[in-house]
Image (tube, rainbow, N blue to C red):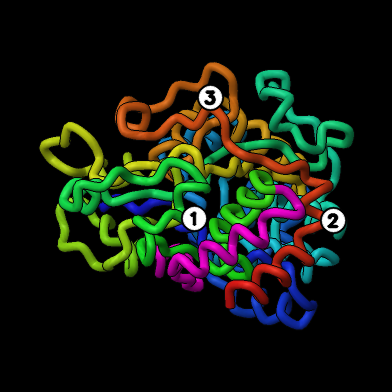
């Protein structure tokens, strides 16, 4: 199975002590990443990208960046996205690189409030729709991709049981779906947090907690990470492989279906995984020029490149995300098997910033 975006990322919404611990755990290294870019002078021809473990770009695309600009990209991967954000916060006085990629709209306020990024208006920013430019007034971050966190379902299970799969948040609390759903802990997983935010967007400040009480009573299973949920608990993971789990519903991504098909020969008529399109929350990922970066020229060039067509069209089958650039073409297999979400739930970043910590505490009290 082609790996679905492995972004089971820490929400980082609890106490400072927990933040420090997460950052310590998320110290994974990247490709050729043994030293910080701070050791390189301003004229360095290496630009260092700090990111989560799921960052991926094809070698020809990175080679194209080097050919166009003269800069070589070094990637420092810092564990899951949340841990990488925290690590960047903890090291902001001595940044480990020039550009950070991977902060999304659920954690954006934390990064901005901590002064991680210097403003930069990227070239071709006019090709990026205004609705994903969430810091348009100051341009401290540049939108790079978007994706939808949704409930996925195992088609074979529902066919065998002659049961229609759920379509909406409301469906998930119905008796016929009792003990079928696995989701991620909102304090340790970005998909889990996004799913909870989707329920808050759907039911409002006064209704989402009652909804989660219903989900709990209907047997929802909670695990720490996306990997645990999708690879271990979900019965539909691994196209062509023996099912690993016993839960036919999982909180994952709208891009899970093509990930189950890429590399499978012959291509099936449809992916073995479906998407409950009425359960989706839109995530947007950003890149920003790290405050205090040593190679600001290289960092700016890299951000420009990341919203260019070459990089944007490479992303779908590298990180299983949607490009944000208008006119970027997605691979045929991504379009054929991926679920197109026309009306995802969303929340304004300032509301997420104001409510996130309290919501996570309330969710923990209700569900755990």
> On the image, which quarter does residue 190 sit in?
bottom right
Q: What residue appears at the point 73 percent right and 45 percent down from the top-left corner? A: 288
Along the line of sight, which residue is nearer the eye, 190 or 305? 190
Quadrant hosting residue 249: bottom left
- Tag 3 residue: 309
Cβ–Cβ below 8 Å for labels 2 and 1?
A: no
Residue beneath disc 2: 354
Q: Which residue is mark 1?
A: 54
Q: Is residue 78 visible?
A: no
Q: Quadrant of the C terminus?
A: bottom right
Mark sitting earlier along the chain (1/3): 1
Q: Secondary structure at mark 3?
A: helix
Residue 117 can be seen in this image:
yes
Of pointers 2 and 3, the one earlier in the residue sequence: 3
Q: Please, what secondary structure does the residue beneath circle 2 have? A: helix
- Residues drawn in magenta: 204-229
In the rendered image, residue 152, in percent from the top left (x then y), is placed at 38, 49
- Is disc 1 surrounded by few (<14), some (14 to 19) or many (20+) residues within 10 Å? many
């Amino acid at each position: 199975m082609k790996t679905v975006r492995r972004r089971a990322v820490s929400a980082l919404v609890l106490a400072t002590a927990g933040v420090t611990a997460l950052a310590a755990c998320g110290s994974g290294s990247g490709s050729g990443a043994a030293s910080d870019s701070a050791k390189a002078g301003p004229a360095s021809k290496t630009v260092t990208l700090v990111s989560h473990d799921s960052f991926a770009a094809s070698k020809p695309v990175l080679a194209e960046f080097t050919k166009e600009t003269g800069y070589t990209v070094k990637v420092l991967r810092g564990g899951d996205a949340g841990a990488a954000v925290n690590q960047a916060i903890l090291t902001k006085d001595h940044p480990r690189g020039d550009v950070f990629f991977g902060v999304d709209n659920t954690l954006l306020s934390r990064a901005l409030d901590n002064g991680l990024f210097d403003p930069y208006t990227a070239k071709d920013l006019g090709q990026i729709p205004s609705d994903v430019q969430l810091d348009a007034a100051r341009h401290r971050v540049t939108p790079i991709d978007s994706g939808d966190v949704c409930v996925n379902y195992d088609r074979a299970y529902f066919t065998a049981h002659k049961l229609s799969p759920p379509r909406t948040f409301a469906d998930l609390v119905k008796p016929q779906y009792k003990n079928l759903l696995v989701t991620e802990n909102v304090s340790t997983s970005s998909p889990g947090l996004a799913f909870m935010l989707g329920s808050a967007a759907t039911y409002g400040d006064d209704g989402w907690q009652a909804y989660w009480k219903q989900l709990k009573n209907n047997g929802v299973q909670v695990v720490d990470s996306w990997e645990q949920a999708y690879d271990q608990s979900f019965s539909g993971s691994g196209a062509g492989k023996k099912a690993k789990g016993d839960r036919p519903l999982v909180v994952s991504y709208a891009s899970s279906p093509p990930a189950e098909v890429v590399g499978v020969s012959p291509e099936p008529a449809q992916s073995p995984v479906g998407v409950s399109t009425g359960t989706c929350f839109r995530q947007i990922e950003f890149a920003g020029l790290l405050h205090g970066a040593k190679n600001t020229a290289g960092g700016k060039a890299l951000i420009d490149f990341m919203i260019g067509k070459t990089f944007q069209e490479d992303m779908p089958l590298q990180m299983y995300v949607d490009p944000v650039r208008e006119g970027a073409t997605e691979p045929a297999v991504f379009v054929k098997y991926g679920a197109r979400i026309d009306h995802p739930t969303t929340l304004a970043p300032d509301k997420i910033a104001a409510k996130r910590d309290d919501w996570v505490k309330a969710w923990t009290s209700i569900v755990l």
